[in-house]
Image (cartoon, grey):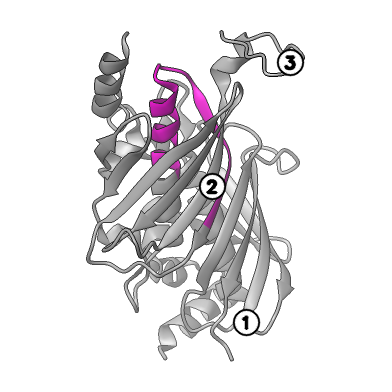
Amino acid sequence: MSARWSEARRAMREQHDDTLLIALIPYARYLGMRAEPGEGRLRVHLPFRENLVGNPSVRAWHGGVTAAFMENTALLQLLVELDEERVPKSIDFAIDYLLSGRPGDLYADCEITRLGHRVAHTVIRCWQTDIGKPIAVARAHFLLTSE
Amino acid sequence: MNESEFFAALRERYIDNSPHMRECGFVVEALSTEYVTVRLPVREDWIGDVENGRLNPGIVTVLVDSTGGLAALARAGEPEPIATLDLRIDHMRPAFFGADLHCRAECLRMARSIAFVRATVWQHDPHEPIASAQLAFMRAGARRVPDMPTHGVQDFVS
């Protein structure tokens, strides 16, 4: 067991500093994800950059990137809220796309809808300018390690 | 554009036209009406947990979405705009840093407005998949076809 997870969690919870947490997940760092404190849960932010565009004619976000951002939003929420000593294992993930991702930043948050002994069920929403008009909604199951 | 020209263009441009697919370094390994396979070279950037070298599930979804879209276009046989409507993925085995990822996708049914696609992903052995996915794509071009009630087995072709 490594102390790095508890240090990263403490920095996020107490100083609202996501640096250590994101550093433990290279793919989240590659995407450029930032975790910010929100109302009772994290508000996760992904700044727009051209290299994450899927369709160049409308400069729309790659749909896979939107999905990846949302699944990692759930992972960050679980890591901050629980006392996991590693990244929870993904069991499955399902996303519905509601609107095309226009050039501009993405935001997401995650609700842990059910927390069992071994499995967490989560619901994630992703929006751009208006939280009331999500561009995608998703749900995911994760396998937890804490026995 | 005839079909063989379209396939040559797809193979050449599908990845290169998309900034993100180009950055990921996807390689189209097989392309036909029946199925497509795409390889994703492994990178340290794809790691999801620094302490055990497991790959992040998100990059697997990027591969599945990209390969699924290619399978739908290959089945369409001509250029048309498509958009992912939904995607569901099961992570059946962990993937680790050290070997490329491969995805095979096939279009199970090309309906007038929707393409239904199935995809599997593996690292070392296609018979030991790390992930399995189902996707639905909206065929945006289908909007041009009048939305008429269908009777029996009638097909409307744009």
Q: CA distance from mark 3 to mark 2?
A: 26 Å
Is label 2 or label 1 in front? 2
Left or right: where does residue B118 sit relative to residue B100?
right
Q: Could you tell me if the residues under marks 2 and 1 are in contact, i.e. CB atoms within 8 Å?
A: no
In this view, the residue in front, B2 or B138, is B2
Residue placed at 26% from the left, 62% from the top?
Answer: B44
Q: CA distance from mark 3 to mark 1?
A: 48 Å
- Going by the numbered disc 2, the residue's amino acid type is Gln
Is label 3 or label 2 in front? 3
Q: Chain of mark 1?
A: A
Residue placed at 73% from the left, 18% from the top?
Answer: B152
Q: Which residues are magenta?
A: B65-89
- Number of residues whose C-alpha sits closer than 10 Å to that of mark 2, classed few (under 14), some (14–19) or many (20 or more): many
Inspect the magenta stretch and tell me whether residue A126 lies in it: no
Q: Which residue is mark 1?
A: A118
Left or right: where does residue B29 sit relative to residue B118?
left
x and y percentages locating residue B75 in the rendered image: 42, 27
Disc 3 element:
loop
Is label 3 or label 1 in front? 3
In this view, the residue in front, A8 or A93, is A93
Q: Which residue is mark 2?
A: B134
In this view, the residue in front, A102 or B117, is B117
Q: Could you tell me if the residues under marks 3 and 2 are in contact, i.e. CB atoms within 8 Å?
A: no
- Outermost residue, front direction? B152
Q: Is residue A47 visible?
A: no
The mark nearer the N terminus, 3 or 2, is 2
Q: Which residue is mark 3?
A: B150
- Number of residues whose C-alpha sits closer than 10 Å to that of mark 3, classed few (under 14), some (14–19) or many (20 or more): few
- Going by the numbered disc 3, the residue's amino acid type is Thr
Q: Chain of mark 3?
A: B
Residue A135 occupies which quadrant of the picture?
Answer: top right
